[in-house]
Amino acid sequence: MRMKFHADEATLIELIGSLGQVDTRDKLLSWMRKDMQEVLPHHAFICGMWRIHRAGVAPIKFFTWNFPADYLQTLKQPDGLYVSPVIKNWLTSGEVQLLDINETAAMSLDSGWLQRFRDSGLTNIAAHGMQDYTRQHASYFSFHQIPEPLGQRHRRLLQILVPSMHAALLRVLHKIRSEARAAHAGRALSARELEVLVWVCEGKTSAEISDILSVARNTVRNQIQSILVKMRVNTRAQAAAKAIKKGLVVPRQPDSQFGPS
């Protein structure tokens, strides 16, 4: 028997398609706050990537919206791991977690955690994520303050949408990491090495760069070797491609072969 969603199939397909354009933190948060509201209204969420340990999870990177920092801090243990009975149940079962603190099912959970959760004002949870094949890392998406009774519709929505949300989160984290590494590479290069790199990107030989900068050819060769090591590449071409891709060097626009009309 097919489930009936508030959103039709076209809306879900459009939502999944729009996730394909998400590759930055701001785009991810905007999608969660706006697009996701079309099918799963909520007033707070937390999502991120976590490293799985036997006693809890350690954050790699997470993002929140209207999520109380005080409550999040209560989940943090002295060893830096975060512990929640809902996350524990999800890691064990791999199933979507639906919880309303006013329902009987909530009474079976740790009373101390339940009171802290109630004090936070989050009211309910609809959460799901994905683990890697080694079960060492996991994405986790948790929505709260959902203004309607939780049920099978919410379970199916998260089952459908979380794989694409997981892929979007990975793109965001990859971009953040790439930008951080590029910034580090830029800081690691000296001012003269950056100057040499600019001419490498222009396709100049060591001899030509030597003449342009009025330094010895051996000096240029040594600087280029240092650049290759710091940028973790093997050739000048790779250094040039990486420098342009990471924004360390902005390539010059080729001059028009025609003069001004």
Image (tube, rainbow, N blue to C red):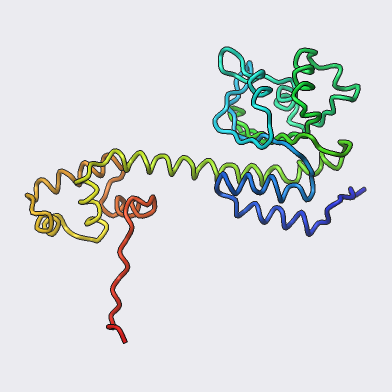
User: In the visual, does 91 lie left or right of 152?
Assistant: left
Q: Which of 143 and 229 is in front in this view?
A: 143
Q: Looking at the rendering, which quadrant does residue 75 occupy?
A: top right
Q: Nearer the viewer, residue 214 or 54?
A: 214
Residue 245 on image: x %, y %? 39, 53
**Vertical comparison of 35 with 183: above or below:** below
Residue 82 on image: x %, y %? 63, 20
Residue 113 on image: x %, y %? 75, 16
Q: Looking at the rendering, which quadrant does residue 45 occupy?
A: top right
Outermost residue on the bottom side: it is 261
Residue at image x 85%, y 16%?
Answer: 108
Q: Nearer the viewer, residue 186 or 94?
A: 186
Outermost residue on the right side: it is 1
For the C terminus, which image quadrant?
A: bottom left
User: In the visual, does 187 lie left or right of 40?
Assistant: left
**Vertical comparison of 119 with 165: above or below:** above
Residue 199 on image: x %, y %? 22, 57
Residue at image x 75%, y 27%?
Answer: 93
**Vertical comparison of 87 with 190: above or below:** above
Residue at image x 28%, y 80%?
Answer: 257
